[in-house]
Amino acid sequence: MAKKNIILCGFMGCGKSTIGSLLAKRSGMAFIDLDAYIEKKEGRSISDMFRDDGEEYFREREREAVKELSMKKGLVIAAGGGTLTFAENVEPLKRNGTIVLLDIPVEVVTERLKNDNVRPLLARPDRNEAIRELYAKRDPLYRAAADITVDAARSPMQICMEIISRV
């Protein structure tokens, strides 16, 4: 496998971290969860960044992390749910990588996230409506950014093997 980066994108709950970790092991590449990378650099959680400094502050840290990581090779990167909804993040990642959309229906997302209490964008009483609205807004942006789209409503190993065969 080439040392080009593989960037996993898709809606929260689509399996980016799970698939990314498995894909890195199977391909001999290093795995980086972009959100965890940002949290480590900041020394605090994304929820804390949103609460204390706002979403724009977090998005700026995200842009900085994308620039840094896009200059490296041999990485499997699990992008945050909003990362590839911004054109300024797509371009640098595409230069040295293949963007893979982990595609799942909104109903599967809703089921997977029903007990999630961590994601700041879902901290609303109308959580299912928030998921539907955000999904409708982000899905076309993911599709526009992606080089490859895979059905992510299957087992992690099936998804991983398909990505390896297509990259």
Image (cartoon, rainbow, N blue to C red):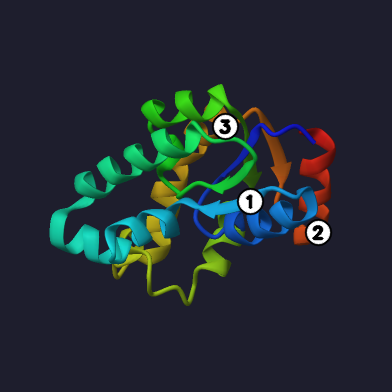
Per the image, label 1 sits on a secondary structure element best described as: strand
14 shown above or below 89: below
Q: Could you say where residue 145 lies in the image, as x and y percent from the top left?
A: 53, 28
* Label 2 – label 3 distance at C-alpha: 22 Å
Which residue position is annotated with label 3?
A: 143
Where residue 162 sits in the image (x, y, percent)?
A: 82, 44
Q: Residue 43, image x and y in percent? A: 29, 64
Image quarter in which the N terminus is found: top right
| Residue depicted at 39% across the width and 58% down the height | 129
Q: Residues within 10 Å of mark 3 (few under 14, many from 20)?
A: many
Q: Nearer the viewer, mark 2 or mark 1?
A: 1
**Is 68 left or right of 153, judged from the image as shown?**
left
Which is more toward the observer, 71 or 120? 71
Q: Amino acid at mark 1?
A: Ala
Residue 59 placement (x, y as % from top left): 29, 43
Residue at the spot of label 2: 157
99 vs 21, nearest the viewer: 21
